[in-house]
């Protein structure tokens, strides 16, 4: 008999209660338990970063965290980045403008990682951004469009502050 | 009309979906009654299977069934089909969907568990007992053909799969009249797929309803439909293959895999849909890679560095099976002579079996290998004759006034390789300017005075793109005014939706956002070939152009009757046909579609077919040849062997660019893949065939932190081979990259006389070369 626990997690602002197997990763819980398939599992050993989500605002690899560890915490996935009215997050807009995605598989993890990074580092250099996403692998873009998008958003945030 | 969007940097239409987490990759798809599969894979590179006991696994709660080869029964007991038969394949070895009595590489599927969840299926794998009898394994291609070498397959007498050769011109004469003959030997290693989405399949078999449906993360759904139907001995009509959103392909997803059959059979036997999602460890073991090639070449040249001939031998590692014919060795030879006019070439390939994962193309297929070989020989000539590498290239390029230029080599199917258009020297000049090549020596000297070692490397390439035979497009205007556009070609991130919508919208006179694009579903478009070899723009592009044009003609003809105007006075804009000079006279494309496709009791206008629709398979009348010149600038730390790429410049020509933003993305991404090949990506097997680099801590992919900003400039020399003047762009970044990086490293380390004979150039290997060079210099 599988070992299970009841958990309650606030996901993208909505409280979600579930009974989960203790061995289920947060990523699998989000994808298969809640149907939030925007979070992607790329390597399941904590290197590629595709599965990155925000837990209480911090970028976390959802393949390395168990769903039960998220009990009582707030999780933001890529589905939760846009405004309620559907307006895309500035990073999403900038990725679109700068061709920061091709196949789109690493994109959710790039967006969540950069959301946390730019909040904590509002004036990054290109080098800073490259280091910040060095835990997110993209096989398609060569990273340039992603870096350009992040630089533009940082600049806009500077003007806005 | 016709070119309104062509060449515009239109933001991609596929992006909002993907950016907001609403893509639909295979693992995102679920359905009623879905079961989950996991595969038990061979832990040995070569072994006989004495017996398999699945009884403990079958008893695990949640397990529905465990399959081994024999469980599929007589009807499904045969080996997989050869996708690309060729006369040079002397030993045609393909796999069984599940191994029968012999395993030939680590990762070969031996058993399959079908369970309520993936986790339970994996639990059950640990309960399967397989009794293996270890057999000797062959791994090293340099000794695989020696007498007494272990055999990759127990029932063969040799590891030679076959031989092929590219030969033209009078090679003996070229070498006898040469002032110099130089030689070089080197190994090339290209690594794996490593799309961020692994492979994955869902099969649903509904014999009384929809038939067999496969959702698979693939580049070639039509190839899979044909291969699967053929293997099953059933009609293609009852097999539907869908490639939904695919998270990167890069070649290894272009084939047909044992799991696609095994999952199909599981669904058939279980009478329930079954899903399998490859995990990353399986990807390392069981997704095809492009591994070692050893080249041993001689170049004949004049005292001025004009190359007269190239000859030698290649040993190509094909892994344990031949899932993909001889495409790799073939496409390694066809790019010879590269961007140069070389009158005679004679290069033969031995294709060798080893007990490693089977090979199939990775971005560029054999082209990066062939181009690397030519570029290495240019480098050798430059070094030996002390002529600047850019100048050696200049003296040997095929000139623009020689176009079209027939090289003497043969493309697939024996078609002569003809360079259709391009100005290779002008392209070189552009990249030299972009990279500040002429002032490099000053930068190098300044750095050297600080104890830093800078180097520069040049690489030029051609790329045969757009191979036939065709792809097709259907364009249909609905009564709603929306335009349905369908093609067979699957996308793995290349932006096909946007590109095709731009072409159709411009030609037909509608807004791109009114186009409903669907692709890669065999039930929705009659036939397709696949997204391989940078072929979609040059095949789908012209077909979309032509289909939209036909629909436009039909709409204008009908509108002329309805509006009582001359066709010549009509124009279409934003879906409305207007009469020039009479702004009140108009009819929408939707209204015209309604007239052509009326409901019951109405009639179709006389002289017209119903439906405002056209299908075209117009493509390219040959392979458009794209070209590029790259310059890499690196810094090497001789103490640690670390290589930093400081600058990377690209001048590229893929003919008319449909969407320059998309082309730029393809080039930059391709270059980074090539830099990964040159510096990082190494799939290591030990001498027993055990893969040692099985995660991303051990197998290094290029990261943002290690990559330079890549500067790209374009020329647009239209291809005369298709209606749009386009050439492919998907692999032109990767093809020349390794040669530029390796040349730059050698240039940086000139005082150590380092000659690189292997890539990836990792720090350990490089420090060994530096030590060796230093020791030789000290003698």
Image (tube, rainbow, N blue to C red):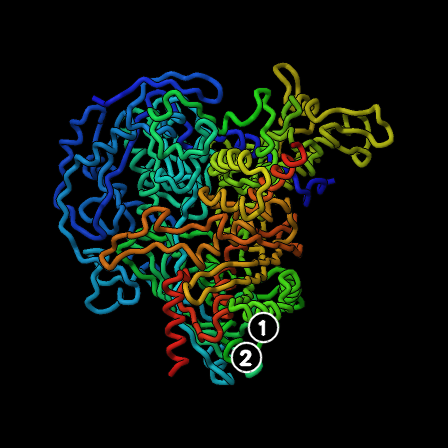
Which residue occupies 66% across, 42% down? B9
Q: Looking at the picture, tell me which residue is in the foreground, B207 or A155.
A: A155
Q: Chain of mark 1?
A: B
> Residue B594's quadrant in the figure?
top right
Residue A43 is situated, as x and y percent measured from the top left of the image, at 37, 40
Residue B378 is situated, as x and y percent measured from the top left of the image, at 52, 72
The Cα–Cα distance between marks 2 and 1, rounded to whole angstroms, is 16 Å
Vertical relation: A82 (above or below) B226: above
Is residue A142 shown left or right of residue B686?
A: right
Q: Chain of mark 2?
A: B
Q: Which mark is residue B386?
A: 2
Vertical relation: B418 (above or below) A65: below
Is residue B713 shown left or right of residue B632?
A: right
Is residue B137 shown left or right of residue B201?
A: left
Which residue occupies 26% across, 27% down? B115
Which residue occupies 44% across, 48% down? B251
Identify the secondary structure beneath mark 1: helix
Q: Do dots 2 and 1 share one subunit?
A: yes
Q: Looking at the picture, tell me which residue is in the foreground, B592 or B776.
A: B776
Vertical relation: B270 (above or below) B754: above
Identify the secondary structure beneath mark 2: loop
**CB atoms of marks 2 and 1 within 8 Å:** no
Which residue occupies 46% across, 81% down? B181
Q: What is the crowding at mark 2: few (fewer than 14 residues within 10 Å), some, or many (at least 20)? A: few
Residue B519 can be seen, yes or no: no
Residue A117 is situated, as x and y percent measured from the top left of the image, at 52, 37
Q: Which mark is residue B346?
A: none
Name the residue carrying label 1.
B396
Residue A155 is situated, as x and y percent measured from the top left of the image, at 64, 39
| In this rendering, the label closer to the viewer, 2 or 1 | 2
Q: Looking at the picture, tell me which residue is in the foreground, B642 or B420.
A: B642
């Amino acid at each position: 008999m599988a070992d299970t626990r009841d958990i309650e997690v606030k996901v993208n602002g909505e409280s979600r209660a579930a009974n989960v197997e203790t061995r289920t990763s947060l990523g699998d819980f989000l994808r298969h338990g809640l149907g939030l398939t925007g979070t992607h599992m790329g390597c399941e050993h904590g290197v590629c970063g595709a599965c990155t989500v925000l837990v209480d605002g911090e970028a976390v690899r959802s393949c390395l965290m168990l769903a039960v560890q998220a009990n009582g915490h707030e999780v933001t996935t890529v589905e939760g980045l846009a405004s309620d009215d559907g307006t895309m997050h500035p990073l999403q807009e900038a990725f679109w403008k700068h061709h920061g995605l091709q196949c789109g598989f690493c994109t959710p993890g790039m967006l969540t990682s950069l959301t946390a990074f730019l909040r904590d580092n509002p004036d990054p250099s290109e080098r800073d951004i490259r280091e910040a996403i060095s835990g997110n692998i993209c096989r398609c873009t060569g990273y340039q469009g992603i870096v350009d998008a992040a630089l533009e958003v940082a600049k806009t945030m500077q003007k806005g502050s | 009309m016709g070119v309104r969007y062509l060449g515009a940097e239109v933001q991609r239409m596929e992006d909002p979906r993907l950016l907001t987490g609403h893509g639909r990759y295979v693992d995102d798809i679920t359905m009623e009654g879905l079961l989950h599969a996991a595969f038990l894979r061979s832990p040995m590179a070569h072994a006989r299977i004495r017996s398999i006991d699945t009884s403990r696994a079958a008893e695990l709660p949640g397990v529905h069934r465990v399959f081994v080869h024999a469980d599929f029964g007589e009807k499904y007991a045969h080996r997989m089909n050869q996708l690309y038969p060729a006369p040079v394949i002397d030993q045609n070895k393909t796999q069984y969907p599940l191994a029968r009595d012999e395993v030939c590489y680590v990762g070969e599927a031996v058993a399959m568990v079908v369970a309520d969840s993936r986790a339970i299926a994996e639990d059950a794998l640990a309960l399967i007992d397989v009794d293996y009898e270890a057999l000797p394994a062959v791994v090293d291609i340099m000794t695989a053909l020696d007498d007494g070498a272990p055999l990759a397959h127990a029932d063969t007498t040799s590891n030679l799969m076959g031989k092929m050769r590219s030969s033209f011109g009078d090679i003996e004469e070229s070498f006898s009249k040469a002032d110099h003959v130089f030689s070089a030997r080197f190994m090339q290693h290209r690594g794996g797929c490593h799309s961020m989405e692994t492979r994955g399949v869902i099969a649903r078999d509904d014999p009384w309803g929809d038939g067999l449906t496969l959702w698979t993360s693939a580049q070639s759904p039509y190839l899979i439909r044909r291969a699967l139907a053929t293997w099953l001995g059933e009609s293609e009509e009852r097999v539907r293959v869908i490639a939904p959103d695919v998270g990167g392909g890069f070649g290894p997803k272009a084939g047909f895999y044992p799991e696609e059959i095994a999952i199909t059979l599981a669904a058939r036997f279980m009478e329930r849909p079954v899903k399998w999602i490859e995990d990353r460890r399986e990807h390392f073991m069981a997704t095809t890679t492009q591994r070692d090639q050893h080249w041993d070449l001689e170049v004949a040249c004049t005292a001025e560095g004009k190359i007269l001939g190239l000859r030698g031998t290649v040993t190509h590692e094909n892994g344990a099976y031949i899932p993909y014919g001889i495409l790799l060795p073939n496409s390694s030879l066809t790019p010879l002579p590269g961007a140069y006019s070389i009158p005679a070439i004679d290069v033969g390939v031995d294709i060798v079996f080893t007990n490693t994962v089977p090979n199939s193309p990775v971005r560029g297929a054999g082209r990066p290998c062939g181009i690397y070989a030519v570029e290495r020989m240019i480098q050798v000539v430059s070094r030996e004759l002390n002529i600047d590498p850019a100048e050696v290239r200049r003296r040997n390029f095929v000139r623009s006034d020689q176009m079209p230029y027939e090289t003497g080599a043969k493309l697939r199917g024996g078609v002569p390789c003809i360079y259709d258009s391009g100005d290779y020297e002008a392209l070189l000049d552009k990249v030299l300017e972009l990279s500040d090549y002429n002032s490099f020596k000053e930068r190098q000297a300044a750095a050297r005075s600080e104890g830093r070692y800078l180097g520069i490397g040049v690489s030029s390439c051609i790329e045969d793109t757009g191979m036939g035979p065709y792809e097709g497009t259907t364009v249909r205007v609905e009564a709603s005014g929306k335009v349905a556009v369908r093609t067979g070609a699957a996308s793995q991130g290349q932006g096909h939706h946007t590109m095709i919508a731009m072409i159709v919208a411009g030609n037909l006179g509608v807004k791109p956002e009114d186009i409903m694009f669907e692709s890669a579903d065999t039930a929705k478009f009659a036939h397709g070939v696949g997204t391989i070899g940078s072929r979609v723009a040059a095949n789908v592009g012209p077909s979309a152009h032509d289909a939209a044009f036909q629909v436009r003609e039909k709409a204008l003809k009908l509108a002329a009757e309805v509006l009582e105007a001359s066709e010549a006075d009509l124009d279409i804009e934003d879906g409305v046909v207007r009469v020039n000079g009479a702004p009140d006279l108009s009819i929408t494309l939707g209204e015209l579609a309604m007239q052509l496709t009326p409901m019951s009791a109405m009639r179709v206008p006389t002289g017209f077919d119903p439906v405002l629709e056209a299908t075209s398979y117009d493509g390219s009348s040959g392979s458009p040849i794209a070209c590029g010149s790259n310059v890499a600038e690196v810094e090497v730390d001789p103490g640690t062997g670390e290589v930093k790429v400081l600058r990377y410049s690209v001048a590229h020509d893929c003919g008319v660019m449909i969407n320059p933003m998309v082309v730029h993305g393809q080039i930059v991404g391709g270059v980074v893949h090539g830099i990964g090949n040159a510096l990082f990506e190494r799939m290591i097997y030990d001498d027993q065939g055990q893969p040692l680099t099985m995660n991303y801590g051990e197998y290094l992919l290029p990261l943002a932190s290690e990559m330079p900003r890549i500067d790209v400039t374009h020329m647009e020399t239209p291809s005369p081979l298709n209606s749009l003047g386009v050439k492919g762009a998907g692999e032109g970044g990767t093809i020349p990259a390794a040669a530029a990086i390796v040349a730059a490293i050698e240039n940086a380390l000139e005082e150590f006389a380092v000659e690189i004979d292997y890539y990836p150039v990792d720090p350990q290997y490089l420090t060994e070369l530096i030590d060796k060079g230093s020791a030789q210099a000290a003698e």
